[in-house]
Amino acid sequence: PRLANQIAAGEVVERPASVIKELLENSLDAGASRIDIDTEQGGVKLLRVRDDGRGIVSDDLPLALSRHATSKIRDLDDLERVATLGFRGEALASVSSVSRLTLTSCAEGEDQAWQVETEGREMSPNVQPAAHPRGTTVEVRDLFFNTPARRKFLRTEKTEFGHLEEVVKRLALSRFDVAFNLRHNGRSVLGLRPAHTEQEARRRVGSVCGPAFVEQSLTIDAERSGLRLWGWVGLPTFSRSQADLQYFFVNGRMIKDKLVAHAVRQAYRDVLFNGRHPTFVLFLEVDPAVVDVNVHPTKHEVRFRDGRMVHDFLFSTLYRALAEQRPGERVD
Ligand code: ADP
Ligand code: MG
């Protein structure tokens, strides 16, 4: 089983960023309202995620680290309408097979916290009492310490941390209601309080994307035939040389999609200089019945039932908003 876990780990765990993604999704699934992330050396030495979610009861702690032990699917019906972010039940098992992992949790309704530790091996569980407020902390140390081949593929500390930070930013933009704190080598990198008002949401976008982006962007909020698009698009003056400030969420889930990219590019076509990339943080809300979010863990794709309608809606909304900023521009 250790080998099986390590093979599975190859699919889920590519680098510190992929570990953080799984841990954060678990915290969100557990209903956390605050998530604190501590990292060292690009996440290779240490990744620690602490949340204030529902927690895991002591009996379930060893289970949470065993393969295909998900608490999130009980039957096939559940599988059909997976609402939670994680449901494969192998992330923690995989991560624990390639690191030194400590899982500490105090479950809702329990008066004591418990802890299990693993060190890159199939767990022979030893559940110990621990001190922890309600919620869960997963600490992952020395990622890939026992799989040198995989360790070799890691890039510099700066690059790995960049990927990791990007994962945190995406999730922070997808959940304004949750507080996120990110530290790297003891230094605070992101400190995001919950954002409930529009003002607070704006501030969060500023913290994540830089204040210049919100200052030089248009606020979008449009609705048509069951579709709602809201968020911020950078003015043409705030374009970038890289396509690195482009966040698009469908029903709260970040996606990268050709149809979406095309609609946005089209809307900017006449106003952007050659080689520049539009910037945006946009949220599309649609009836879940008309969209298939690809459930593959590492892909960010969607399939719209009526792609043309979505494309038209995106294009015309953004085009109008941008054209209004430029008097005399033709509006189709
Ligand atoms: P999955 O998320 O696909 O179920 P994981 O391996 O990521 O599988 O997690 C296994 C199980 O451990 C989850 O189903 C959940 O019950 C529990 N778990 C993991 N992280 C947390 C957390 N932060 N808070 C509460 N429960 C958690
Ligand atoms: Mg999970």
Image (spheres, helix red, strand yellow):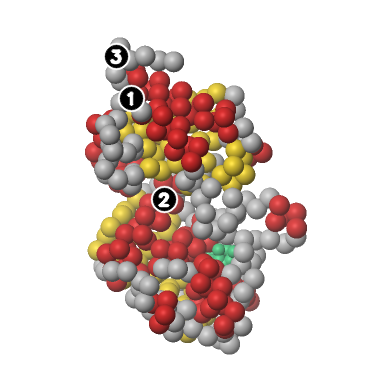
Q: Amino acid at mark 3?
A: Pro
Q: Position of residue 148 (x, y in %)?
A: 40, 82
Amino acid bearing label 2: Arg
Rendered location of residue 87, percent (x, y): 62, 61
CA distance for labels 2 and 3: 34 Å
The residue wearing badge 1 is 270
Determine crowd level at label 1: few under 14, some 14-19, many 20+ residues with C-alpha closer than 10 A.
Answer: few
- Residue 170: give its label: 2
Q: Amino acid at mark 1?
A: Asp
Which quadrant of the structure image shows residue 168? bottom left
Sort mark 3 into few (<14), some (14-19) or many (20+) by Cα contacts within 10 Å: few
Helix, strand or loop at label 1? It is loop
Q: Is residue 248 above or below residue 71?
A: above
Left or right, residue 35 beside residue 240 = right
- Report the residue at 45% width, 24% height from top: 317
Quarter of the figure with the N terminus: bottom right
Residue 109 visible from this viewpoint? no
